[in-house]
């Protein structure tokens, strides 16, 4: 987080050095313990779902603040530092293949916390749908590669997950908080953060996409061969008139980094659509959650809904934050002093009270002071 400008998150590969991770785990455990003891597990989840606080935590722990790796490393450190029996919080999932272990880990944690089978299934569903929404319902060129599910003994949960766009080497982080969610389909995020805002992105979670969502469900209730005919009827002219039909992006924005929202898909999962037709979904959440319904299918249905039935989806990128508090000159936006001050206050208090050595405490406070903008 810089005092001015935007903190970039280039897509970095590799691992954090072991010597750093060990120290991060030690400090993280003390900070988490103090926050949970003083404010409760619910407040801890709220802080994790706040992009300002999470980013500040990464800075305090000493990790490279402008790297996409802050998400994967900090959540990985928290997974090692947080002890369910001690903190009343568990961390499931992680990066790459570990992310796919989240459902099984949620089941094991639910047994520890004494949840019913229905409660456990609801938590597994929340993990699945949060990932499905960010990987499929929102299409801005980012493929999820990291999914972390935070779960409390009270059954509250939060999700921090991240997608990558190899074409322009940027990352995007998604924050979810259970208490803020009324449903998984209509603007469910607590925050979506990244330093690139696409001129065009398919957002089926936007309120403006309501008509398109309903039309998409209605379309899947038709036999798949009819849907195929609809696609074939618009495809020849579609590619030719695409740039005239869709909102024009900024110069070179999509020419250099094209993404799939600009084309009618050719690889729709027709077997899945046949199964959806036989199931007859009653709403968009059921459709989206159906196994085999991926980005291509969602995009194809959305384009048919607009081109043939006039139900336009939202083509505005839902990202709302950059990885910065703002700049003193109002670039890229005015400093959110309230959010920043609250983040700094809580972390400062936690570090001061942490049972760590004077040297580590001093270094952590120095890193924290670097976040304070000069007025």
Image (tube, helix red, strand yellow):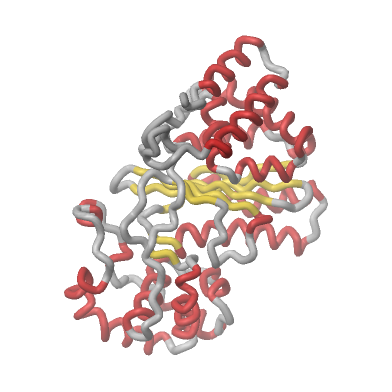
Query: Can residue 191 be seen here?
Result: yes
Q: List x then y, in percent, for residue 181.
A: 63, 60
Q: Nearer the viewer, residue 225 or 359?
A: 359
Q: Residue furthest right?
A: 114
307 is higher (above) or lower (below) than 38: below
In this image, 100 relative to 113: left or right?
left
Residue at 69% of width from left, 48% of height from top? 151
* The image quarter in which residue 234 lies: bottom left
In this image, 59 relative to 248: left or right?
right
In this image, 255 relative to 68: left or right?
left
Q: Nearer the viewer, residue 257 or 110?
A: 257
In this image, 248 relative to 161: left or right?
left
75 is higher (above) or lower (below) than 167: above
Query: Can residue 145 be seen here?
Result: no
Residue at 72% of width from left, 42% of height from top? 89
Residue at 45% of width from left, 51% of height from top? 320
Q: List x then y, in percent, for residue 232.
A: 27, 83
Q: Count every numbered label the image shows and give the total.
A: 0
Q: Nearer the viewer, residue 75 or 276?
A: 75
Residue at 39% of width from left, 38% of height from top? 330
Quarter of the image for the N terminus: give it: top left
Q: List x then y, in percent, for residue 141.
A: 35, 55
334 is higher (above) or lower (below) than 311: above
Q: Residue furthest left?
A: 240
Q: List x then y, in percent, for residue 304.
A: 36, 80
């Amino acid at each position: 987080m810089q005092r001015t400008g935007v903190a970039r998150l280039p897509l970095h590969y590799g691992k954090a050095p072991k010597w750093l991770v060990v120290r991060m785990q030690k400090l993280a455990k003390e900070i988490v313990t103090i926050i949970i003891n003083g404010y409760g597990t619910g407040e801890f989840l709220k802080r994790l779902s706040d992009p300002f606080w999470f980013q500040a935590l990464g800075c305090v722990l000493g990790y490279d603040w402008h790297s996409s790796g802050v998400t994967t490393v900090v959540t990985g450190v928290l997974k090692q530092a947080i002890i369910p029996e001690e903190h009343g919080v568990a961390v499931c999932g992680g990066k790459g293949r570990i992310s796919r272990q989240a459902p099984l880990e949620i089941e094991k944690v639910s047994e520890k916390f004494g949840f019913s089978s229905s409660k456990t299934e609801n938590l597994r569903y929340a993990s699945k749908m949060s990932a499905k929404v960010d990987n499929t319902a929102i299409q801005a060129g980012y493929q999820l590669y990291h999914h972390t599910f935070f779960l409390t003994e009270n059954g509250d949960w939060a999700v921090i997950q991240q997608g990558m766009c190899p074409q322009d080497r940027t990352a995007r982080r998604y924050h979810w908080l259970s208490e803020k969610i009324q449903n998984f389909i209509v603007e469910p995020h607590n925050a979506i953060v990244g330093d690139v805002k696409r001129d065009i992105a398919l957002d089926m979670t936007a309120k403006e996409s309501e008509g398109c969502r309903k039309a998409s469900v209605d379309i899947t209730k038709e036999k798949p061969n009819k849907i195929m005919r609809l696609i074939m009827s618009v495809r020849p002219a579609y590619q030719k008139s695409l740039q005239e039909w869709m909102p024009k992006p900024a110069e070179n924005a999509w020419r250099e980094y094209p993404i799939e929202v600009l084309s009618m898909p050719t690889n729709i999962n027709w077997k899945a659509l046949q199964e959806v037709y036989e199931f007859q979904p009653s709403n968009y959440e059921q459709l989206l959650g159906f196994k085999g319904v991926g980005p291509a299918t969602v995009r194809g249905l959305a384009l048919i809904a607009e081109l043939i039935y006039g139900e336009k989806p939202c083509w505005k990128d839902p990202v709302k934050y950059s990885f910065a508090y703002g700049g003193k000159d109002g670039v890229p936006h005015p400093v959110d002093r309230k959010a920043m001050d609250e983040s700094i206050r809580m972390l400062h208090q936690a570090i001061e009270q942490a049972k760590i050595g004077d040297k580590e405490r001093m270094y952590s406070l120095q890193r924290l002071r670097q976040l304070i903008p000069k007025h």
